Image (spheres, helix red, strand yellow):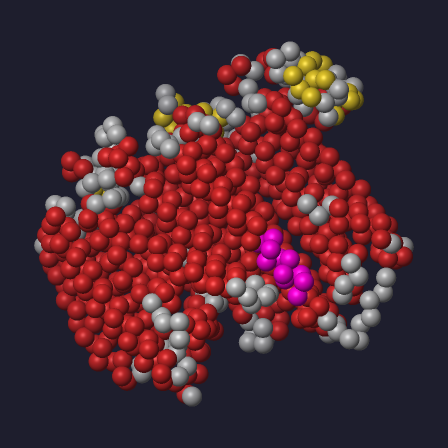
C-alpha cells in the first residue's frame, strides 16, 4: 500500500466511523424527547425507563462522536494540508457555525444527562430537544461543507489562484440542500431502524416485552417515516448529480456509453476494460427518466469523460446498488409498520419482529454505502474540477503506519462499544423490570 | 474584524487550557493518587467534571476551526511538520474521552473498570504532554521545512529539549490547576487535606518544570528569557502570577473555594500571556528565523469578517448557556458545601 492510498483509506475509515456516532448522536435525542414527553404527560413509567435507558446510549455515542469529530478536524490538515490551505477560508463558514452548534449540543447534553430532578420538568425536557436540534444543525452544516467539495462555489479560480472568496456563497452551494436533506433523512432512517431492530430482537427473546415494544414503536415510526421520504430526496439528488457531476452518475450506474433513452442498470458486474456490464437487469429509458425527468433524454456516459478524470466504476456502482437495495427493503418494512399500526396483531407475530431485527444494520449499511458513492464518485478530485486528491496529500512519508494505527483504534473502539451496548441491554431487566407488567407474546 | 478573530483564538486556547487542562489534570491527580484513596478521588472527580466535561473540550475545536478558516497556511504548516505529536495527542484525546464515559456508563462493574481507569489516567497524562510539546515546537525554531531527511523534517522539529520541557511544564500546570479546583470539591476534611497536599506537590513540580523550560531554552537557543523579561507586559505578568501564587497559598486554609479557583486561573492566564505576548503576532517561528505571523498569513478580509461574526453571534448563544451550566452544576454545589 502506498502513502496516498493509506491517507485516503484513513480518511474513509475516520469518516465512516464518525458518521455512525454522529447520526445516532443527532437523531436519538428526538426519540428520547418523544419518550420523555410521553412520560411527563401520561405518567407511564415505561416511558421514563426508556428515556433513561436511551440517554445512556446517547452519552456513549455522543462522547465517541465528539472525540472522533475532534480527530477529523485535525485529520483534514494532517492528511490534506494542501487542500486545507486553499479551502479553509472558502468552505470554513459552515465549520465555524458548526462549532457553535456542537458546543450548544455539548452544553445541553450536560443539562439533560445530569438534570434529572434538578430542574423544572419542562425545562429539562426542553434541554433534550435542544440537544437534538443543535445536533441536527451540526450535521447539516458539515454536509454543506462536503457539498462544496462536490460543487465548488464562492470563489474564482484564476491561474491556480483562489480569488474573490465569498464564504457565504460557498456555504450555500448548489449541492448543499439536496445533500443535507438526503443525509438528514438517512440519519433518521438508519438510527430508527437500528434502534427498532435491537428492541425487536429483545422482543423476540421475550425479555421485558412491554419496555421493548414501547421503545420499538417510537424508533420504528421515526425510521419508517424517513425511509418513505428518502426516495423523493434521492430523486432530487440524482437529478442534481446528473447535471453537476455527470461522471459520478455514470459511475453509479456503470453507464459507459453516452446515449438517449438510457437504461437503468440494476445489479450486474461492471467491466471497466471492455466497458460493459455483465449479468445486469436493464430497465429501458429509466436512467434518462431518473436523471432528467424524460424517458428519451441523453445521459452522459463515461466515454465523454477524460480517462484521467473518471472515478473508479466498480466501487461506486456496487456501493450505489447496496444503498438503493437497503433503502428499498427499509421502505417495504416502513409500509408494513403502518399496516401493523392498523392490524395490531402484527406486532405479536414473530416474523414481523424478525424482519425488523434483520434490518438492524441496514440503515447504517446504506449510510456507509451512500458516502462511498459521494466520496469515491468524486475522485480523482478532492475539490471537483479544481484540485486533485493526489495533489492535496501531505508530503510526510509513512502515512501507512498512521493508517494502521487509526484502524486499530477504530476497530478496538467498535468492539468495546458493542460490548458496552450488550451489557446495557442485558441490564434492562435488573434496572427496569416491573413485576406488574407481564410480557405478552 | 481580524482582531476579533485573533482575540477569540487566544481566548479559546486560554479557556481550553483552564477548563480542558483542568480535566486532564484531574486524570493526572488520579494517576498520582494512592490506591487507598483512589475510589474517593474518582467519585469527587466524576461529580466535579461529569456534567461539564464535554463542553470543556469544545474549546479545542473552536481554536482549531479558527485556525483552519482564518489562518489556513499556519494550520497546514503545523499539520505537516508536527504531524507526529499531533497524532499522539489525538490518540490521547480519543482514548481519554471514550474511557471516561465507558467507565461511567458500563452497566456492569467488573475488571473492565481497571482497564478504563488505566487508559483514562495515562491518556490524561500523555495528551497534555503532547499538546505542550506541539505548543513548544511552534516557537522553538526547530521546524525545518527545507529538510530533506525524515528525522530533521518530521521528528527533530518537536523532539528537542525545549519542546519536551514545555510538554512536562504543561502537564504539571494541568495537575496544579486540577488539584486546586478539586480542593473545593472535596466533601470531607481528610479529602480536602489530600487535595491540598496534591496541589502543593503539583505547585513544586510546576516550578521545577518551569525552571527546566528556561534551562532547555538556553540549551536549544530559544530566546525565552528575552521574550518573558524583555518587555513590561511580560515582566508584569510574571510578577502578577507570582503574587497570585502567594495569595493562593494564604487563602487555602480559609476555604474560599471560588476565590481559589479564580486565583489559579488568573495565574495560568498570566503565564500564557507572558509567553504569547512577546512574539505576537508570530505564532510559528521556524529554523533560520522564518516566522508565520497572524497578520500576514490570514484569510481574505471577507472570510475574516464572516468568521468574526460567526464567533460573535455564536458566543452570544454559547456563553449564557455555558454560564448557566457551570452555575447549575458547580456554583450551586459549592454554595451547598459552604453552607453545610
Residue B44 shows up from this direction:
no
User: Would residue B117 appear left or right of A358 to someone viewing this image?
Assistant: left
User: Would residue B47 appear left or right of B150 to someone viewing this image?
Assistant: right
User: Would residue B65 appear left or right of B199 to someone viewing this image?
Assistant: right
Task: Using the rendered view, name the quadrant where residue B313 is placed.
Answer: bottom left
Check the image and name the residue furthest to the bottom: B340
Residue B263 or residue B318, whichever sits in front: B263
Quadrant containing the C terminus of chain B in the rendered view: bottom left
Magenta region? A417-427
x, y percentage for residue A355?
A: 80, 47
| Residue under the point 52% across and 64% down | B111
| Residue under the point 34% across and 80% down | B192
Residue A339 or residue B315, whichever sits in front: A339
Residue A368 shows up from this direction:
yes
x, y percentage for residue B316?
A: 43, 59
| Residue under the point 60% across and 31% down | A373
x, y percentage for residue A348?
A: 86, 57
Q: Please say whether residue A229 is one of the residues in the magenta stretch.
A: no
Residue B12 or residue A439, whichever sits in front: A439
x, y percentage for residue A113?
A: 56, 66
Q: Please say whether residue A422 is one of the residues in the magenta stretch.
A: yes
User: Would residue A125 appear left or right of B121 to someone viewing this image?
Assistant: right
| Residue under the point 23% across and 35% down | B152
Residue A346 or residue A89, whichever sits in front: A346
Amino acid at each position: 500500500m502506498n502513502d496516498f492510498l493509506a491517507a485516503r483509506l484513513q480518511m474513509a475509515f475516520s469518516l465512516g466511523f464518525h458518521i455512525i456516532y454522529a447520526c445516532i448522536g443527532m437523531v436519538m435525542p428526538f426519540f428520547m424527547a418523544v419518550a420523555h414527553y410521553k412520560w411527563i404527560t401520561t405518567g407511564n413509567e415505561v416511558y421514563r425507563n426508556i428515556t433513561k435507558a436511551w440517554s445512556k446510549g446517547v452519552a456513549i455515542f455522543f462522547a465517541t462522536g465528539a472525540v472522533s469529530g475532534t480527530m477529523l478536524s485535525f485529520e483534514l490538515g494532517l492528511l490534506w494540508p494542501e487542500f486545507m490551505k486553499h479551502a479553509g477560508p472558502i468552505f470554513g463558514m459552515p465549520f465555524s457555525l458548526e462549532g457553535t452548534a456542537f458546543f450548544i449540543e455539548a452544553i445541553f447534553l450536560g443539562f439533560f444527562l445530569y438534570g434529572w430532578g434538578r430542574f423544572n420538568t419542562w425545562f429539562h425536557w426542553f434541554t433534550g430537544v435542544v440537544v437534538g436540534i443543535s445536533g441536527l444543525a451540526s450535521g447539516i452544516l458539515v454536509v454543506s461543507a462536503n457539498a462544496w467539495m462536490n460543487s465548488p462555489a464562492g470563489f474564482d479560480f484564476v491561474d491556480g489562484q483562489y480569488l474573490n472568496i465569498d464564504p457565504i456563497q460557498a456555504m450555500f452551494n448548489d449541492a448543499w440542500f439536496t445533500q443535507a436533506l438526503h443525509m438528514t433523512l438517512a440519519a433518521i432512517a438508519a438510527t430508527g431502524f437500528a434502534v427498532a431492530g435491537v428492541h425487536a430482537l429483545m422482543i423476540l427473546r421475550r425479555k421485558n416485552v412491554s419496555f421493548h415494544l414501547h421503545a420499538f414503536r417510537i424508533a420504528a415510526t421515526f425510521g419508517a417515516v424517513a425511509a418513505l421520504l428518502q426516495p423523493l430526496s434521492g430523486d432530487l439528488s440524482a437529478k442534481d448529480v446528473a447535471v453537476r457531476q455527470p461522471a459520478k452518475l455514470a459511475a453509479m450506474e456503470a453507464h459507459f456509453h453516452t446515449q438517449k433513452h438510457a437504461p437503468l442498470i440494476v445489479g450486474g458486474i461492471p467491466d471497466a476494460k471492455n466497458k460493459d456490464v455483465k449479468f445486469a437487469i436493464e430497465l429501458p429509458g429509466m436512467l434518462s427518466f431518473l436523471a432528467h425527468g424524460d424517458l428519451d433524454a441523453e445521459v452522459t456516459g463515461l466515454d465523454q469523460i477524460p480517462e484521467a478524470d473518471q472515478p473508479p466504476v466498480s466501487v461506486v456502482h456496487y456501493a450505489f446498488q447496496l444503498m438503493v437495495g437497503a433503502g428499498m427493503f427499509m421502505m417495504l418494512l416502513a409500509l408494513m409498520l403502518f399496516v401493523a399500526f392498523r392490524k395490531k396483531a402484527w406486532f405479536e407475530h414473530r416474523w414481523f419482529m424478525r424482519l425488523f431485527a434483520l434490518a438492524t444494520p441496514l440503515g447504517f449499511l446504506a449510510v456507509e454505502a451512500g458516502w462511498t458513492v459521494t466520496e469515491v464518485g468524486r475522485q480523482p478530485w478532492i475539490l471537483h474540477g479544481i484540485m486533485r486528491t493526489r495533489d492535496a496529500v501531505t508530503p510526510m512519508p509513512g502515512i501507512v503506519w498512521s493508517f494502521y494505527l487509526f484502524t486499530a483504534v477504530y476497530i478496538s473502539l467498535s468492539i468495546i462499544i458493542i460490548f458496552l451496548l450488550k451489557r446495557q441491554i442485558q441490564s434492562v431487566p435488573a434496572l427496569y423490570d416491573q413485576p406488574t407488567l407481564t410480557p405478552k407474546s | 474584524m481580524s482582531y476579533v478573530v485573533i482575540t477569540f483564538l487566544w481566548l479559546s486556547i486560554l479557556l481550553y487550557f483552564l477548563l480542558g487542562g483542568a480535566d486532564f489534570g484531574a486524570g493526572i491527580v488520579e494517576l498520582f493518587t494512592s490506591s487507598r484513596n483512589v475510589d474517593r478521588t474518582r467519585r469527587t472527580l466524576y461529580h466535579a467534571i461529569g456534567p461539564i466535561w464535554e463542553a470543556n473540550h469544545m474549546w479545542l475545536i473552536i481554536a482549531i476551526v479558527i485556525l483552519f478558516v482564518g489562518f489556513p497556511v499556519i494550520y497546514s504548516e503545523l499539520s505537516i511538520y508536527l504531524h507526529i505529536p499531533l497524532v499522539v495527542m489525538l490518540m490521547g484525546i480519543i482514548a481519554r474521552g471514550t474511557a471516561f464515559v465507558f467507565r461511567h456508563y458500563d452497566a456492569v462493574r467488573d475488571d473492565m473498570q481497571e482497564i478504563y481507569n488505566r487508559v483514562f489516567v495515562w491518556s490524561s497524562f500523555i495528551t497534555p504532554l503532547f499538546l505542550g510539546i506541539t505548543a513548544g515546537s511552534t516557537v522553538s525554531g526547530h521546524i525545518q521545512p527545507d529538510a530533506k531527511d525524515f528525522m530533521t523534517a518530521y521528528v527533530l522539529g518537536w523532539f528537542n529539549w525545549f519542546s519536551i520541557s514545555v510538554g512536562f511544564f504543561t502537564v504539571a500546570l494541568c495537575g496544579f490547576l486540577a488539584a486546586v479546583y478539586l480542593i473545593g470539591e472535596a466533601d470531607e476534611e481528610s479529602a480536602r487535606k489530600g487535595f491540598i497536599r496534591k496541589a502543593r506537590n503539583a505547585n513544586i513540580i510546576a516550578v521545577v518544570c518551569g525552571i527546566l523550560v528556561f534551562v532547555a531554552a538556553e540549551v536549544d537557543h530559544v530566546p525565552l528569557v528575552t521574550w518573558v523579561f524583555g518587555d513590561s507586559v511580560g515582566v508584569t505578568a510574571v510578577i502578577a502570577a507570582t503574587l497570585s501564587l502567594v495569595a493562593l497559598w494564604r487563602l487555602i486554609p480559609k476555604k474560599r473555594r471560588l476565590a481559589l479557583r479564580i486565583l489559579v486561573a488568573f495565574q495560568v492566564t498570566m503565564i500564557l500571556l507572558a509567553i504569547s505576548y512577546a512574539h505576537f503576532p508570530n505564532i510559528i517561528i521556524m529554523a533560520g528565523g522564518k516566522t508565520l505571523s497572524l497578520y500576514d498569513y490570514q484569510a481574505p478580509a471577507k472570510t475574516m469578517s464572516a468568521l468574526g461574526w460567526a464567533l460573535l453571534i455564536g458566543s452570544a448563544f454559547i456563553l449564557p448557556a455555558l454560564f448557566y451550566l457551570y452555575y447549575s452544576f458547580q456554583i450551586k454545589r459549592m454554595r451547598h458545601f459552604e453552607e453545610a
